[in-house]
Image (spheres, helix red, strand yellow):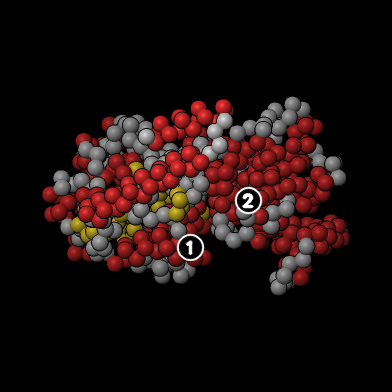
C-alpha cells in the first residue's frame, strides 16, 4: 500500500461511519486538491527567493521564509501576492494555507469556518476555481450536529491528509486517489455515484493507440465528451513528443465529477488556456460548436447502455443524420459513439469503451453498425477481460475508429484480449505485458493464432455485419487426448491397492483388545468394509 493510499484509508476511517463512500470521497479529494494548491504556493515562494533547489527543505522552512517576506512590509506582501498570481494564477493568504490550518488543528484551535472562508476566497480568484469546492459541504450535519463537532471531524481529516507528500507521488494523484477510494471503500461506489472511472491500464491502451502516427503533431487537441475525472485524456501526454502542446477539451454531465476533472487537470500542470471543459449533457446538445470542434484524438468511456431521449429532432442533427437511424432510447451507446466520431478530424483516431452488445445487436443499432462498416469507420475491435471496471463486472470492448482511411480500406482488426489478465481480490487487472500484447497486435494488423484476426469487408458482410469477436477469432483449445487403455490399467491398479489396504485395516481391527465399549464399534466398522 502506497503512502497516498495509507493516508486516504486513515482519513476515510474518520468519515466512514458518518457517510458512504460516494459522499466522503468528495471531502477527501477536495481537501487533497486544496493541500496541493497550498503546498505548491509554498514551493513557488521558496523558488522565488532561492531559485530551484536540488532538494526542497521541509515545509516549515518554506513557510517561515514566506512569512518573513510577507511580513516585511505591506509593499513586500503585495509584491508577493502579485508574483504568485502571475506565476500560479492564484494566491492563498498565509492564514488560509493548508499548512496553517494543519498547525491550528494540531493545537486544537481550528474552526471549520476558517476552511469555508479559505474555499470562498480561492473561488473568487477567477473562473478556474469557481464552484470547485461546492461538493465539500462543511455545513452537513453528517460531519456533526453542531459547528464544534464538525470542526473536530474536519480537523482530524486535515491532520491525517497533511502527511501525504503530493510531490513525491508518481502518477495521477486525483485519479489514483479516486480509483483507490472506489476500489477499497465501497464496491458499488462508482455505480451509486453515477460515475465511471477508466482504470489506468485501459487508459494507456487507448492513449497509446490513438497517438500512433500522430506523435509529432503539435498542437495536439484531444476531446473526451464523457470525461469523468479527466484521467483518460491526461494519459495522452505519455505518448507524444510535444506533451506541453496538448490542449484538453472535455464535457461531463455530473457536476461533482466535472469539478473533479478540473482539479485533476490543474494538478497535472495544465495551463488555463490549454483546457476547455464544459458541464453539460453531451447528447442533448452538441458541444463544442465553435473552433476547434474537430480533434486529433477523441477518447471516451461513456455510461454503458444509458437512456437518452432519442427524440426525432436528432434525425436532422448532423451528428446522427447520415446514419438514418437513432440509437434506441434504452441504449445510448451508438449515440455517444456517433457524437465522438462527428468531432474527429479526418486525420485523427478515436477510441471508445462500450459493452459487447454494440458488436451484434440488431434493429437500429444494426443499421448504424452496417453504415459505419461500409464507410470504413471501424478500424479495430479489442475485446477486454470481464471485471476490470469499477461499478460493473461486464466484459467490455474498445472500438477504434478512423476517417478517410488509406485506399478506402474497410477491413477490421479484431483482437480477443479477454483471457490475458491478473486476477486480484475484487477486480481483474491488465498487466504491462497484457497491454503491450494488445498494442503490438494492433500495430502488426494481421492474424495471430487464437488472438487476432484481420477480417475483410466481404467476410464481415457474409456475417451480416455482426462483429461478435468469437465469429472471427477462434480461441478454442483442443482438450488433451485421453489414453483409455492407460487410464483403465491405472484404475485396476488402484482398485487392487484399495482392496489390499482394506484387508490390512481389518487385520489390525482383529488385533485390538475388545472391551464392552469398543466391541460394538469394531463390529460396525467390519460391516462397512465387508
User: Is residue 81 shown to the viewer in this render?
Assistant: yes
Who's the residue at 47% across and 46% down the image? 427
- Kindly state the secondary structure of the residue where label 1 is placed: helix
Would you name the residue on which mark 1 appears? 237
Q: CA distance from mark 2 to mark 1?
A: 25 Å
Image height of 96 relative to 217, above or below: above
User: Is residue 266 shown to the viewer in this render?
Assistant: no
Q: Is residue 342 left or right of residue 230?
A: left
Q: Nearer the viewer, mark 2 or mark 1?
A: 2
Image height of 194 relative to 71, above or below: above
Of label 2 and label 1, which has the lower sequence position? 2
Q: Quadrant of residue 406?
A: bottom left
Q: Is residue 439 left or right of residue 257?
A: left
Who's the residue at 70% across and 39% down the image? 14
Q: Quadrant of residue 16?
A: top right
Would you name the residue on which mark 2 appears? 5
Between residues 152 and 53, which one lies in front from this camera angle?
152
Q: Quadrant of residue 330?
A: top left
Who's the residue at 45% across and 67% down the image? 240
Between residues 319 and 387, which one lies in front from this camera angle?
387
Residue 451 in the image: x percent, y percent?
A: 29, 58
Amino acid at each position: 500500500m502506497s503512502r497516498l493510499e495509507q493516508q486516504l484509508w486513515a482519513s476515510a476511517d474518520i468519515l466512514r461511519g458518518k457517510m458512504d463512500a460516494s459522499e466522503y470521497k468528495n471531502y477527501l479529494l477536495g481537501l487533497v486538491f486544496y493541500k496541493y494548491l497550498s503546498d505548491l504556493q509554498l514551493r513557488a515562494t521558496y523558488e522565488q527567493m532561492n531559485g530551484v533547489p536540488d532538494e526542497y527543505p521541509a515545509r516549515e522552512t518554506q513557510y517561515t521564509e514566506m512569512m518573513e517576506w510577507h511580513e516585511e512590509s505591506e509593499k513586500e506582501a503585495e509584491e508577493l501576492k502579485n508574483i504568485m498570481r502571475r506565476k500560479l494564477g492564484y494566491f492563498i493568504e498565509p492564514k488560509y494555507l493548508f499548512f496553517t490550518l494543519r498547525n491550528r488543528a494540531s493545537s486544537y484551535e481550528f474552526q471549520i469556518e476558517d476552511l469555508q472562508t479559505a474555499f470562498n476566497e480561492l473561488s473568487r480568484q477567477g473562473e478556474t476555481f469557481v464552484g470547485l469546492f461546492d461538493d465539500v459541504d462543511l455545513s452537513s450535519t453528517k460531519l456533526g450536529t453542531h459547528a464544534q463537532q464538525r470542526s473536530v471531524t474536519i480537523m482530524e481529516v486535515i491532520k491525517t491528509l497533511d502527511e501525504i507528500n503530493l510531490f513525491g507521488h508518481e502518477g495521477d494523484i486525483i485519479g489514483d486517489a479516486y480509483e483507490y477510494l472506489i476500489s477499497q471503500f465501497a464496491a458499488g461506489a462508482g455505480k451509486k455515484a453515477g460515475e465511471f472511472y477508466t482504470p489506468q491500464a485501459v487508459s494507456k491502451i487507448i492513449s497509446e493507440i490513438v497517438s500512433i502516427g500522430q506523435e509529432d503533431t503539435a498542437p495536439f487537441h484531444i476531446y473526451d465528451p464523457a470525461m469523468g475525472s479527466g484521467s483518460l485524456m491526461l494519459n495522452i501526454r505519455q505518448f507524444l513528443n510535444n506533451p506541453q502542446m496538448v490542449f484538453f477539451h472535455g464535457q461531463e454531465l455530473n457536476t461533482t465529477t466535472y469539478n473533479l476533472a478540473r482539479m485533476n487537470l490543474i494538478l497535472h500542470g495544465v495551463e488555463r488556456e490549454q483546457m476547455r471543459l464544459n458541464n453539460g449533457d453531451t447528447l442533448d446538445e452538441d458541444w463544442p460548436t465553435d473552433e476547434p470542434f474537430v480533434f486529433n484524438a477523441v477518447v471516451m468511456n461513456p455510461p454503458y447502455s444509458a437512456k437518452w431521449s432519442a427524440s426525432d429532432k436528432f434525425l436532422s442533427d448532423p451528428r446522427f443524420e447520415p446514419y438514418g437511424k437513432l440509437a434506441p432510447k434504452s441504449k445510448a451507446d451508438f449515440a455517444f459513439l456517433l457524437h465522438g466520431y462527428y468531432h474527429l478530424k479526418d486525420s485523427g483516431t478515436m477510441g471508445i469503451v462500450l459493452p459487447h452488445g454494440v458488436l451484434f445487436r440488431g434493429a437500429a443499432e444494426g443499421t448504424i453498425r452496417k453504415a459505419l462498416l461500409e464507410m470504413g469507420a471501424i478500424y479495430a475491435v479489442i475485446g477486454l477481460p470481464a471485471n476490470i471496471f469499477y461499478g460493473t463486472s461486464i466484459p467490455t470492448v474498445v472500438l477504434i475508429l478512423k476517417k478517410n482511411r488509406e485506399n478506402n480500406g474497410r477491413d477490421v482488426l479484431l483482437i480477443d484480449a479477454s483471457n490475458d489478465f491478473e486476477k486480484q481480490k475484487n477486480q481483474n487487472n491488465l498487466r504491462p505485458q497484457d497491454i503491450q500484447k494488445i498494442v503490438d497486435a494492433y500495430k502488426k494488423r494481421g492474424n495471430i493464432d487464437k488472438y487476432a484476426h484481420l477480417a475483410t469487408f466481404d467476410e464481415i458482410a457474409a456475417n451480416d455485419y455482426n462483429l461478435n469477436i468469437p465469429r472471427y477469432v477462434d480461441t478454442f483449445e483442443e482438450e488433451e487426448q485421453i489414453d483409455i487403455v492407460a487410464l483403465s490399467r491405472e484404475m485396476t491398479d488402484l482398485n487392487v491397492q484399495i482392496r489390499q489396504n482394506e484387508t490390512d485395516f481389518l487385520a489390525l481391527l482383529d488385533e485390538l483388545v475388545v472391551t464392552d465399549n469398543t466391541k460394538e464399534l469394531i463390529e460396525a466398522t467390519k460391516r462397512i468394509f465387508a
